[in-house]
Structures are given as C-alpha cells and as structure tokens.
Amino acid sequence: MSLSRNRAQFAWAGLLAVGAFAGAVFLARAYPAPAPRPAPGSGTADRDVEDRLAVVERRLDRERARLVSGSSALAAPAAQAADAARGDGQEDAEEAEEAAPRRTREEWARDVVDHYTSFHAREADDPAWSSRTEAEMATVLREAELEGSSLDSVDCQSTVCRLELSHAGQDSQAHFLQHIPQQPPFDTAGFYHRVDTPDGASRTVLYVARAGHELPAPPRL
C-alpha cells in the first residue's frame, strides 16, 4: 500500500510540474510586441496606450483561465488514480489482517524464541572472534559471582552468541536477570527467555549481539 501511494503522489507532482512549465512558456508568448512610445502630453496617445493595455489584460485573463482549466483536467485523473490506489491498498491490507488467524500470546512467545534460535543456528562461524568472545563471557560471568547461577554453555557464531545458564531456583534466576553484566562483551543488544523444565529446574537462554551489530527484530504479535 505504501508503494502504491508513493507512486501516485509522484505522478501527481509530475503533472503539476509539466503544467506549470507549459503555462509559463505560453504566457510569455502571449505578450504582444512593444507599442511605439507616444509623444509626451498627447491625450490621444494616452488613450491608445490604455486601450492596448486593456486588450493585453483580457488576453492574459483568457490564457490564465485556459491554463487553470487544462491543469485541472490533467490533475483530475491522477487524483482519482491516487485515491483508488490508496483505497485498494488499504482494503487489501485490512482484508489480509482480518483473514490472518489470531495468535495467542503463548504462540507468539514461542515464535519469538524460534526466531532467535533459527537466526543463531543459520549464522556462519567466525572462529577468531567466537573463541575469544566465548572465553571472555565465561570469565565475566565467573567473576560476577552470581550465587545460585552457573553457565552451562556458550556458543558464538559471527555476530551473535547464545548462552544457557542454570539456576538453583526462581529467586536465583530473578537475581541473575536483574544483574546481567553490563561490561564487554555483554554491553550490546541482547534477548533472553526463561525455560522451566519438567523437573522444576530454572534455566535462562541469552542471545547477545556482537559489538557493532544488532539482533533482528522479533516477529510482531
């Protein structure tokens, strides 16, 4: 819909620009040749000049009216096309939105998790950066002394790292999420989700972007 509207607006502006240019040329040609300068103090000559000016003014009025009428005739189809494009696009978008099945918040949450899991899995490895960053992340978490939380795995690719941690309980998990390190290499964009296993254990999965990169936007609800 947005593309159709932009195209319609571009066509409308083009018509206005062409009409204005043609009108300027035509009006320039509508001026008559300069009249001879009358002798000073001649009443007849003054009336003749006034008559000539009146004729010129009438011609200009007619040409202005013609140009306005012509521009309106050209603009009307473009305006109608623009309105039609906007209306059709809006109707199509509304119909598609109504036809799409509504997801529950739980379904959306699963889609978000799958989205980041797939993004990490598809990335190629940058061995030099990933091995160094994995070691740095493990060191930072160990030195943070986050009691009740332990790092189980860290896997970096080329622009994103995936970390999985286990917690002694929900209190330890909440404490970790409130105190995620804010120093390199954790001081970038990130996303986390909690995992409650059938045995009651609490786990957290984090995705951390490489410095200078961003995580992809999550799917909309």
Image (cartoon, rainbow, N blue to C red):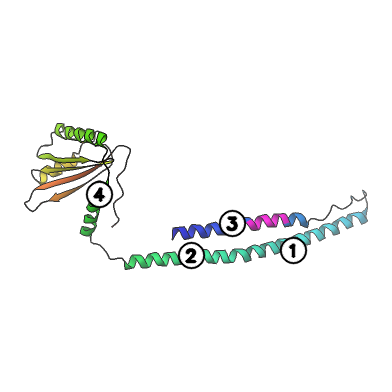
Q: Which mark is residue 85?
A: 2
Residue at mark 1:
62
Graded by Cα atoms within 10 Å as few (under 14), some (14 to 19) or many (20 or more), the crowding at tag 1 reads few
Q: Nearer the viewer, residue 95 or 51?
A: 95
Three-letter residue code for mark 1: Arg
| Of the image marks 1 and 4, the number of the one nearer the N terminus | 1
Residue at the spot 74% in from the left edge and 56% down from the top edge: 27
Task: Pick the quarter of the image with the N terminus.
Answer: bottom left
| Of the image marks 3 and 2, the number of the one nearer the N terminus | 3
| Of the image marks 4 and 3, the number of the one nearer the N terminus | 3
Q: Which image quarter: residue 30?
A: bottom right
Q: Are marks 1 and 3 in contact (CB under 8 Å)?
A: no
Graded by Cα atoms within 10 Å as few (under 14), some (14 to 19) or many (20 or more), the crowding at tag 4 reads many
Instruction: Look at discs 4 and 3 and give the one toward the viewer.
Output: 4
- Was residue 19 drawn as part of the magenta stretch in this picture? yes
Residue at the spot 56% in from the left edge and 59% down from the top edge: 12
What element does badge 3 sit on? Answer: helix
* Magenta region, residue range: 18-25
Residue at the spot 32% in from the left edge and 40% down from the top edge: 213
What element does badge 2 sit on? Answer: helix
Residue at mark 3:
14
Q: Which mark is residue 116?
A: 4
Distance of label 1 from label 3 (alpha carbons): 25 Å
- Magenta segment, prevailing SS (helix, strand or loop): helix
